[in-house]
Image (cartoon, rainbow, N blue to C red):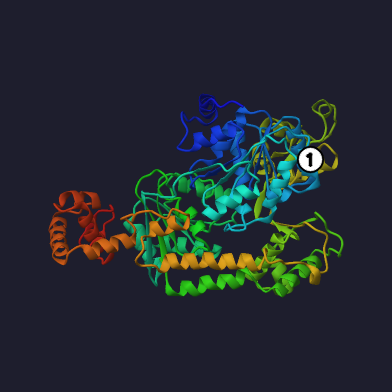
C-alpha cells in the first residue's frame, strides 16, 4: 500500500480543495494506508470523514462505512457525489430492488464508498454480496456504539467482527469516535478484534472554550441575558420538539433572530433553516440533539443547554460545537433544583418494567397482524403516536421498550427519516427510444428526467417531482400519476417520497412470554445509565472543582490543571481578589464608562491592573448587573 503522504495530500487538494491535513488526520491516513487496524479519537468538528475518504480514493475496491445515522449517511453520500466521487448507501426503508442494485454496483466496481447501517450487516443479501466485493478497508463510525460501556451501545455493531471474517485477512478496520472513556477505548479495539492496539488521540482539552453552569429558576430570561452578553452565532439545546419552537418564539419576541430545529421537520425545512443559520441570517438555533451532526460551522460562539443531557459524553460532544475556529467561546449549562428529579425520572422512563416491554412486543405483533413464527425481515411503516393511541400506552416508556426490544435483537426501530422519491429505468436506453407511449406528457417527463438526472439506467436516483412539474409547467399531481403509470408499464421503477420511521422484525414473532431480556440488555445497561446520570448531576451541582478538569478526568485525563476561565475558576479568582482591590477596580471602571461605553477587551486594556484581576472584577459586575451591554455589545453603566 502507498504510504507516501504527498500522494494523499494531492488527493485532498484535488477533491476537497485543502492543501494540508489537520492535526492527527495525516497520522490516521498513513496508519490505514499501511494496513493497520486503527482507532481515531477526534473531537467534534475534527474532520473524521477525511481520514477514510482520502485513503480510500487511492486504494483498490470499495470502502465500507458502517454508521448508525441514516440522515448523516445520506448527507455524506450526496456530498461525495457532488465532488464526482461514486458513493451509495443501504439502510432500512429501501426496497429489495434498490439494495440489490446498490450492492451489485459495488461488486462491479461502480462505487468507491458503500455506507451501510449496522442493522443491514447481518442480512442474507448483504452477506452474500459482500463475498463478491473487493473491499479496500472497513470503517466503523461512531465506534463507541460497539461498547456496552459506551453511552449509546447498539448490539448490531457486534456483528462487525463477524463481517471481518468474510474479508481477506489483511483488510484493515478504521474505528472513529468523538468521545470515549478509557474503558470504551479498550473495549472498541477488543470487540473489533484489532490485531494490535493502535490509537490516535487528541487531548479532549479545549483551551478556548469556557464551561459555565448557572443555577437559575427563570431559564428563558437568563438565556436572553447570556445571548445579550455573548455576541455571535449560538445553539440552544432542549429535550423536546415543542420546546424548540417555544424558546425560539420567546427569543424572536425579544428582538433576536432565532429559529427552531428537530427531527420531525421536512428535509426542505431542515435545509432552509440550517443554511440561514450557517450564513448568519439566523443568529440562534434552538434545537433537539438532532441538530449539529455533520454541520461545519466553525464560528459558533455559544452553546447553551437549557435541559440536562443524559451523559457527559453527549454534553461534551454538543458543547464542543462551539469555538471550532479556536477563538474564545462559551458552553453554558442552565440548571435548576427541579432538574435533578427530572433527570432521575429518565431512568424509569428509559427502563420500563420487563412486563411492560413484553406487552409492548405483543401489541406490536397484533398491530401489524404478524402471526407467531412469521414476520422475519418484514418492514412496516410505523407511527409511535398512532401505536400508543391504539393501545393507550404512554409515549416515553413505550419508545424505551421498543429500543430495549431492538437491543435484545427482536426488532429494529429506525429513526424518522425523509425518503426522497427515487427512480430507475427498467428498460435499456436503446429499447426506450423504440417504445411508443402515445402520450406527450409521458414523453416530456422521460426526456426531462434524462436531462436532469444521471445514472438512471444503472441505479436508483433521487428525483424531485416539484422541479419536474415546474419545468414542464404541469401540476405536480400529474407528474406523480404519470410516473406511477410508467412504473405500471414496466418502463421505470418509481418509489414516491415518504416520511416515516420503520419497524423491522429481525426475528420471527415469538410468544411474548418467552422473549428473553437478559442482564446485558437490561440490568447492566440500566446500571451504566444510572452512573452516567450521576456524573451529569455531579458536574451540574459541583461548585468547587474546575469544570474543564471534571470533564477531562471523566475521559481519562487525570492530571489536568485548572482552566482559569470556567465559572468555578472565575469564582475562585474573585474570592482571592482582595476587597480593597475589587473596590478600586470597580470605581475605576465606573469612572471610565461614564465617559464612553467600551467592550471588555478595550476596558481591560484601559485599566492599569493585572488582566486576570480586571477580568474577574468585570465579570462579577456583569453577573450582578452593575454593568450592562448596550446594543453594540459594549459595556456601560445601567
SS label for mark 1: helix
24 and 318: which one is in front? 24
The image quadrant where one finds the C terminus is bottom left
Name the residue at 54% across, 32% down: 30
**Are there few (<14), some (14-19), or many (20+) residues within 10 Å of tag 1?**
some
Q: Find disc 1 in the rendering and name its residue.
A: 100
Q: Is residue 215 left or right of residue 74?
A: left
Up the image or down, 272 lies above or below 239; here it is above
How many discs mark residues in the rendered view?
A: 1
Residue pushed farthest front?
196
Residue 33 visible in the snapshot: yes
Q: Quadrant of residue 426?
A: top right
632 and 25: which one is in front? 25
Name the residue at 22% across, 63% down: 576
456 and 341: which one is in front? 341
Q: Is residue 488 left or right of residue 161?
A: right
- Estimate the x, y position of residue 636 in percent, counting from the top left: 21, 58
Q: Quadrant of residue 15?
A: top right
Q: Quadrant of residue 525?
A: bottom right
The image quadrant where one finds the N terminus is top right
- Estimate the x, y position of residue 298 in percent, counting from the top left: 43, 44
Up the image or down, 214 lies above or below 21; here it is below
Q: Is residue 105 left or right of residue 633?
A: right
Up the image or down, 453 lies above or below 117; here it is above
- Estimate the x, y position of residue 115 in percent, counting from the top left: 66, 42
Name the residue at 73% across, 38% down: 167
- Estimate the x, y position of residue 538 in percent, counting from the top left: 44, 67
Amino acid at each position: 500500500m502507498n504510504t507516501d503522504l504527498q500522494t494523499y495530500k494531492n488527493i485532498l487538494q484535488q477533491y476537497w480543495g485543502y492543501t494540508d491535513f489537520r492535526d492527527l488526520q495525516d497520522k490516521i491516513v498513513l496508519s490505514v494506508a499501511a494496513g493497520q487496524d486503527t482507532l481515531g479519537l477526534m473531537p467534534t468538528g475534527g474532520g473524521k470523514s477525511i481520514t477514510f475518504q482520502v485513503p480510500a480514493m487511492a486504494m483498490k475496491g470499495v470502502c465500507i462505512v458502517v454508521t448508525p445515522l441514516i440522515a448523516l449517511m445520506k448527507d455524506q453520500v450526496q456530498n461525495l457525489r457532488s465532488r464526482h466521487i461514486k458513493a451509495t448507501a443501504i439502510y432500512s426503508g429501501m426496497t429489495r430492488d434498490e439494495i440489490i442494485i446498490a450492492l451489485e454496483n459495488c461488486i462491479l466496481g461502480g462505487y468507491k464508498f458503500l455506507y451501510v447501517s449496522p442493522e443491514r450487516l447481518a442480512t442474507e443479501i448483504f452477506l452474500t454480496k459482500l463475498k463478491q466485493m473487493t473491499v479496500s478497508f472497513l470503517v466503523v463510525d461512531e465506534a463507541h456504539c460497539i461498547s456496552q460501556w459506551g453511552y449509546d451501545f447498539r448490539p448490531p455493531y457486534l456483528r462487525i467482527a463477524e463481517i471481518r471474517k468474510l474479508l481477506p485477512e489483511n483488510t484493515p478496520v478504521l474505528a472513529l469516535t468523538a468521545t470515549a472513556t478509557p474503558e470504551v477505548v479498550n473495549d472498541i479495539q477488543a470487540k473489533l478484534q484489532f490485531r494490535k492496539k493502535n490509537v490516535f488521540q487528541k487531548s479532549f482539552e479545549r483551551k478556548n472554550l469556557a464551561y459555565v453552569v448557572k443555577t437559575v429558576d427563570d431559564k428563558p430570561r437568563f438565556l436572553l441575558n447570556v445571548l445579550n452578553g455573548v455576541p455571535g452565532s449560538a445553539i440552544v439545546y432542549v429535550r423536546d420538539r415543542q420546546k424548540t419552537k417555544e424558546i425560539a418564539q420567546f427569543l424572536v419576541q425579544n428582538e433576536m433572530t432565532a429559529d427552531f430545529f428537530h427531527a420531525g421537520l421536512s428535509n426542505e425545512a431542515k435545509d432552509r433553516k440550517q443554511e440561514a443559520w450557517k450564513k448568519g441570517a439566523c443568529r440562534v438555533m434552538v434545537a433537539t440533539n438532532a441538530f449539529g451532526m455533520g454541520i461545519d460551522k466553525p464560528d459558533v460562539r455559544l452553546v447553551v443547554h437549557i435541559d440536562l443531557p443524559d451523559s457527559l459524553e453527549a454534553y461534551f460532544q454538543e458543547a464542543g460545537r462551539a469555538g471550532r475556529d479556536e477563538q474564545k467561546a462559551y458552553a453554558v449549562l442552565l440548571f435548576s433544583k427541579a432538574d435533578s428529579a427530572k433527570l432521575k425520572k429518565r431512568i424509569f422512563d428509559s427502563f420500563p418494567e420487563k412486563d411492560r416491554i413484553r406487552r409492548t412486543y405483543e401489541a406490536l405483533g397484533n398491530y401489524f397482524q404478524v402471526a407467531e413464527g412469521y414476520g422475519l425481515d418484514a418492514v412496516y411503516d410505523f407511527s409511535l403516536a398512532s401505536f400508543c393511541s391504539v393501545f393507550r400506552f404512554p409515549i416515553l416508556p413505550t419508545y424505551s421498550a421498543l429500543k430495549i426490544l431492538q437491543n435484545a435483537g427482536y426488532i429494529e426501530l429506525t429513526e424518522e427519516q425523509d425518503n426522497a422519491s427515487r427512480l430507475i429505468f427498467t428498460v435499456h436506453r436503446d429499447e426506450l427510444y423504440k417504445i411508443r407511449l402515445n402520450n406527450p406528457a409521458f414523453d416530456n417527463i422521460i426526456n426531462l428526467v434524462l436531462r436532469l438526472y444521471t445514472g438512471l439506467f444503472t441505479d436508483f436516483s433521487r428525483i424531485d417531482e416539484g422541479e419536474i412539474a415546474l419545468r414542464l409547467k404541469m401540476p405536480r399531481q400529474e407528474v406523480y400519476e404519470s410516473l406511477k403509470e410508467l412504473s405500471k408499464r414496466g418502463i421505470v421503477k418509481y418509489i414516491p417520497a415518504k416520511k416515516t420511521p420503520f419497524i423491522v422484525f429481525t426475528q420471527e414473532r415469538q410468544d411474548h412470554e418467552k422473549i428473553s431480556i437478559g442482564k446485558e440488555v437490561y440490568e447492566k445497561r440500566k446500571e451504566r445509565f444510572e452512573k452516567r446520570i450521576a456524573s451529569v448531576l455531579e458536574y451540574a451541582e459541583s461548585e468547587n472543582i474546575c469544570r474543564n478538569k471534571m470533564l477531562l478526568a471523566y475521559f481519562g485525563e487525570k492530571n489536568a490543571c485548572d482552566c482559569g476561565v470556567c465559572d468555578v475558576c472565575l469564582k475562585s479568582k474573585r474570592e482571592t481578589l482582595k476587597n480593597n482591590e475589587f473596590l478600586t477596580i470597580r470605581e475605576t471602571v465606573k469612572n471610565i464608562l461614564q465617559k464612553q461605553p467600551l467592550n471588555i477587551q478595550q476596558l481591560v486594556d484601559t485599566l492599569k491592573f493585572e488582566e486576570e484581576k480586571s477580568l474577574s472584577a468585570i465579570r462579577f459586575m456583569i453577573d450582578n448587573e452593575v454593568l450592562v451591554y448596550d446594543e453594540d455589545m459594549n459595556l456601560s453603566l445601567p
